[in-house]
Image (cartoon, helix red, strand yellow):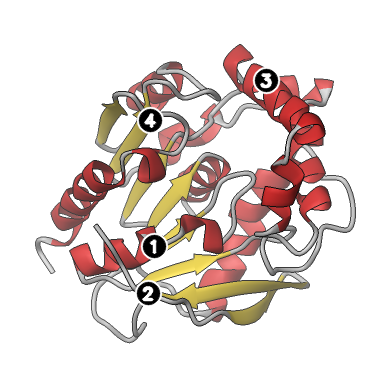
Amino acid sequence: MTSTFIPDMQYLDAVGRRLEYYWTAGHDRDGPTLVFLHEGLGSAGLWRDFPALMTEATDLTALVYSRYGYGGSDVLEASRGIDYMHAEALEVLPAIRDALDLDDTILVGHSDGGSIAAIHAGAGQWPVRGLILEAPHFFVEDESISGIEDAKIAYESTDLPTRIACRHTDGDKTFRGWNDIWLSPVFRDWNIEEYLPGITCPTLVIQGVNDEYGTEAQLAAIGQQSSGSVDTVMVPECGHAPHHDAAEGVLDVMSDFVATLTSSD
């Protein structure tokens, strides 16, 4: 499975911040737009070729962007608050959708991006045709904290800072902004389950069996509380990033799900 796609990075202003983004194909196509929302240490670039491969598999254009504090977007200026994912879901993403005329969307969110997608859809204020949530968090588990503590140790004792710096304008601020808030005592009570009943669109949830940041309890929560249909897939021998660890199989599962959402178009 290969792709020679090279993104043409562009920039927009949303809620006072300059954000980088790219399209995987011409965005005047018919049908919904796939909107990719990256993980807590991710960026537009860290999705690698996966969005382009999704476009090839589904014939749908994808929008891929880096949130504030990530990639080539504006550098984080202050510590993140406990509500940082709410702000992304309820303020920034709506502003991006408005600026780029994204009326019909399928949100593809990984980790923090999955949580942001769930909040956005669950708020019920903006149309969402479907959700693809990869290793999302709806509440904080002991496994989440343990994984993030391990990430802090790795950051302070390995070459992780160098690797993170390759993908972000200020890698240290990116890492600290994510790591510090998750390890803050006040974040232990973070919970977005209140948004799950407001999700009415079909949802696909994918998680690695060996995910170091969460358990099947996350899948159970949305399966029990969402108002829409929920399909769940546990990927064997896979960690927190199924689209990297098991790319070909995950691409097939995601594209098949998208086909069910667009079959009547």
Q: Which residue is mark 2?
A: 5
Residue nearer the viewer, 1 or 159: 159
Density class for disc 4 (Cα within 10 Å; few <14, some 14-19, many ≥20) is many
Q: Nearer the viewer, mark 1 or mark 4?
A: 1
Q: Which residue is mark 4?
A: 207
Say which amino acid is labelled 2. Phe
The N terminus sits in image quarter: bottom left
Say which amino acid is labelled 1. Asp
List x then y, in percent, for residue 42: 59, 51
Q: Earlier in the sequence, mark 1 or mark 4?
A: 1
Residue 49 numbered mark, or none: 1
List x then y, in percent, for residue 244: 40, 45
Element type where label 3 sits in the image? helix
Element type where label 4 sits in the image? strand
Element type where label 1 sits in the image? loop
Q: Earlier in the sequence, mark 1 or mark 2?
A: 2
Q: Please state if 224 lies on the left or on the right of 36 as rendered.
A: left
List x then y, in percent, for residue 123: 52, 47
List x then y, in percent, for residue 159: 72, 41
Q: Earlier in the sequence, mark 4 or mark 2?
A: 2
Q: Nearer the viewer, mark 3 or mark 2?
A: 2
Measure how far apart labels 3 and 2 are at the Cα level. 36 Å
Density class for disc 1 (Cα within 10 Å; few <14, some 14-19, many ≥20) is some
Q: Quadrant of residue 140?
A: top right
Residue nearer the viewer, 101 or 26: 26
Q: Which residue is mark 3?
A: 145
The C terminus sits in image quarter: bottom left
Q: Earlier in the sequence, mark 4 or mark 3?
A: 3
Residue nearer the viewer, 181 or 201: 181
Task: Judge whether 213 appears above or below 28 on screen.
Answer: above
